[in-house]
Amino acid sequence: EVQLVESGGGLVQPGGSLRLSCAASGFAFRSYTMNWVRQAPGKGLEWISSINSVGSRLSYADSVKGRFTISRDNAKNTLYLLMNNLKPEDTAVYYCAVGYQGSDRRGQGTQVAVSS
């Protein structure tokens, strides 16, 4: 069974930083492209970043480019998202996601709130 468990969210002031983690199990993590998506209050899901299986190809949404960094540790089956210079509009529930056997799988999410 695919399991994705996000952690690391919290309340941070504008300009602050957070590092999110996603512990993966139940599938061959090292073989899959992984993604971070988020959902702001009252809005739909927004893709924000992807990393290929070996970590050599990274992609970012324009809204986070230059501020967020995605990475992975295949030995630990863990995905990361380092978020710098956070803005109030980054407030959302953040999910790691994987396309597995024809469907998108997500964890329960971790809440990030950016406010002074």
Image (cartoon, rainbow, N blue to C red):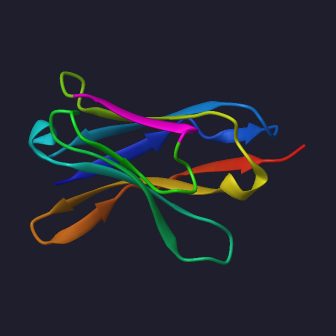
Determine the image quadrant of residue 97: bottom left
Q: Which residue is at a point 74% across and 47% down the rendered structure image?
A: 87
| Left/right of residue 72 with respect to residue 9 in the rendered view | left
Above or below — where is 17 with respect to 115? Answer: above
Above or below — where is 67 with respect to 32? Answer: above
| Residue 94 drawn at (x, y percent) | 52, 53
Q: Residue furthest right?
A: 116
| Residue 83 drawn at (x, y percent) | 58, 36
Q: Nearer the viewer, residue 64 or 25?
A: 64
Q: Nearer the viewer, residue 90 or 75?
A: 90
Total numbered badges shown on the rendered structure? 0
Assess whether residue 69 is covered by the magenta stretch.
yes
Above or below — where is 101 with respect to 72? Answer: below
Q: Which residue is at a point 84% across and 47% down the rendered structure image?
A: 115
Image quadrant occupied by the C terminus: top right
Q: Main secondary structure of the magenta part?
A: strand
Assess whether residue 23 is covered by the magenta stretch.
no
Q: Nearer the viewer, residue 49 or 100?
A: 49
Q: Nearer the viewer, residue 64 or 110?
A: 64
| Residue 9 drawn at (x, y percent) | 61, 40
| Residue 24 drawn at (x, y percent) | 27, 41
Q: Which residue is at a point 74% across and 32% down the rendered structure image?
A: 16
Q: Which residues are magenta?
A: 66-73
Q: Which residue is at a point 68% across and 70% down the rendered structure image?
A: 41
| Left/right of residue 50 with respect to residue 89 in the rendered view | left
Image quadrant occupied by the N terminus: bottom left
